Image (tube, rainbow, N blue to C red):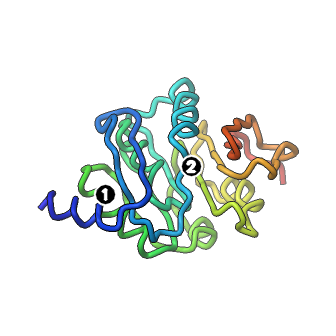
């Protein structure tokens, strides 16, 4: 059965990803080339997780991966011991690929196919780590910090991390606590609830 799933996942492979650490450390994954995604680079992902490792205990953590795409961040979180990762994306192909890969790797990833903005407003879960990697040209990208924080996705003491292009700045946002740039990408980190 695992071989059948592996062949399905490898078909039309295009996007190469690597799990950096945890139970699947060093494992390479290939996502189909027809998915409308821009996976986070290994360099940026490794740097981000080095920061996370110094701030949080990922073993036993809960996480939400918005605009999951290929599931790159979700697999890394699951491999490092997160007990629950909710991966949300609107695209049917992305959701199918993440479900198949999570099953293959036996990771605790639940996939939700939904419009991310609508899902945030009706979600009834919280997580220590909330990550979002929307399309860089998404017109509502600037709305995400307030939307995530005001709808309570982030549990007390948790963090919201938004990946976005370098030309976009959230430096004036009251909840921003850190910015980390890697190439053309920036991770903006939000930890405090914004004032109304």
At 70% from the left and 67% from the top, the residue drawn is 138
- Give the position of the N terminus as an image quadrant: bottom left
Query: In this rendering, is residue 182 above or below 122?
Result: above
Q: Position of residue 5 (x, y in %)?
A: 21, 63
Tag 1 residue: 101
Tag 2 residue: 130
Rendered image: mark on residue 112: none
Residue in the foreground of this view, choosing between 37 and 102: 37
Residue in the foreground of this view, choosing between 8 and 176: 8
Kindly indicate whether the residue at mark 1 contacts the one at mark 2 (C-beta within 8 angstroms): no
Q: Position of residue 167 (x, y in %)?
A: 81, 51
Task: Please give left or right for residue 104 compared with residue 91 in the image.
Answer: left
At 39% from the left and 41% from the top, the residue drawn is 19
State the residue lying farthest toward the right: 172
Task: Please give left or right for residue 65 compared with residue 100 in the image.
Answer: right
At 45% from the left and 59% from the top, the residue drawn is 70
């Amino acid at each position: 059965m695992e071989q059948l799933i592996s062949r399905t996942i490898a078909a039309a492979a295009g996007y190469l990803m690597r799990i950096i650490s945890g139970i699947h450390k060093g494992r390479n994954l290939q996502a189909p080339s027809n998915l409308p995604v821009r996976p986070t680079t290994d360099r940026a992902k490794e740097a981000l997780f080095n920061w996370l490792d110094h701030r949080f205990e990922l073993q036993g953590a809960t996480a939400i991966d918005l605009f999951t795409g290929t599931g790159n961040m979700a697999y890394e979180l699951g491999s490092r011991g997160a007990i629950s990762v909710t991966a949300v994306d609107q695209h049917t192909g992305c959701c199918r690929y993440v479900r198949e890969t999570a099953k293959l790797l036996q990771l605790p990833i639940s996939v939700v196919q939904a419009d991310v903005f609508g899902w945030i407003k009706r979600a009834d879960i919280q997580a220590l780590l909330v990550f979002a990697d929307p399309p860089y040209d998404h017109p509502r990208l600037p709305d995400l910090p307030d939307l995530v924080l005001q709808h309570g996705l982030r549990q007390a003491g948790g963090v919201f991390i938004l990946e976005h292009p370098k030309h976009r700045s959230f430096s004036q946002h009251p909840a921003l606590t850190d910015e980390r740039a890697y190439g053309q990408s920036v991770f903006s980190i939000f930890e405090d609830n914004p004032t109304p």
